[in-house]
Amino acid sequence: DITQAVLMMNSPFILRQVKVQPGSYVSNLLEQPSLSESDRVQKLFTRFLTRQPEQAEFATAKDLIQTYGRKGYEDLQWLLVNKVDFLFNY
C-alpha cells in the first residue's frame, strides 16, 4: 500500500543500506577492477530483482552511473529497492 511505499522511500535504514561504504555490497563491486560498469549493473539487478535489466532499464542505469559516478550506484540501488518487483517479491 501507499504507506509501505512512502516508508521504503524515506526510511533512514534503507538510505544507509544503499550507501557506498566499506563492506557494503556495492563497495565490494566497485573494488573489483575486473568488473565492467555493465557487469556491475547486471549484478545489482540480479541481486535485487533476480533478473537481468531490460534494455531501457540498462540504458537508464548506465546513464545514471556515468552522470553521477559512485552516487549513481547508490541511487541505482535505491531505485531497485523501491521498484514494484522488489516490494512485492520480497
Image (spheres, rainbow, N blue to C red):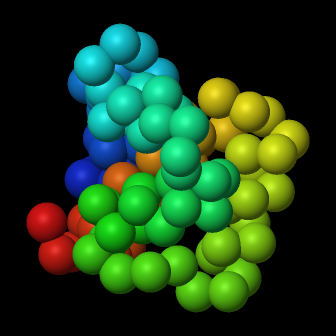
Residue 37, percent from left and from top: 65, 53
Taking the spot 78% from the left edge, 34% from the top edge, the residue there is 68
User: Quadrant where the N terminus lies?
Assistant: bottom left
Q: Residue furthest bottom?
A: 54
Residue 73 point in image, percent of width and height:
58, 40
- 76 left or right, relative to 61: left
Quadrant position of residue 62: bottom right
Q: Residue at x 64, y 75 (%)?
A: 57
Residue 28 makes an appearance in the image: yes
Residue reaching furthest to the top: 22
Residue plotted at (46% across, 47% down):
77
Q: Quadrant of residue 90?
A: bottom left
**Viewer-nearest residue: 45 or 79:** 45
Determine the residue located farthest toward the right in the rendered image. 67
Coordinates of residue 50 in the picture (x, y in percent): 27, 75
Outermost residue, front direction?
34
Q: How many marks?
A: 0
The answer to whether residue 76 is left or right of residue 5 is right
Residue closest to the eye, 39 or 54: 39
In the image, residue 38 sits, relative to residue 21, either above or below, namely below
Residue at horizontal 74%, vertical 66%? Answer: 60
Q: Residue 16 appears at what percent x and percent y?
A: 35, 21
Whether residue 13 sits left or right of residue 21 in the image: it is: left
Q: Relative to 44, say whether 25 is above or below.
A: above
Whether residue 12 is visible, yes or no, is no
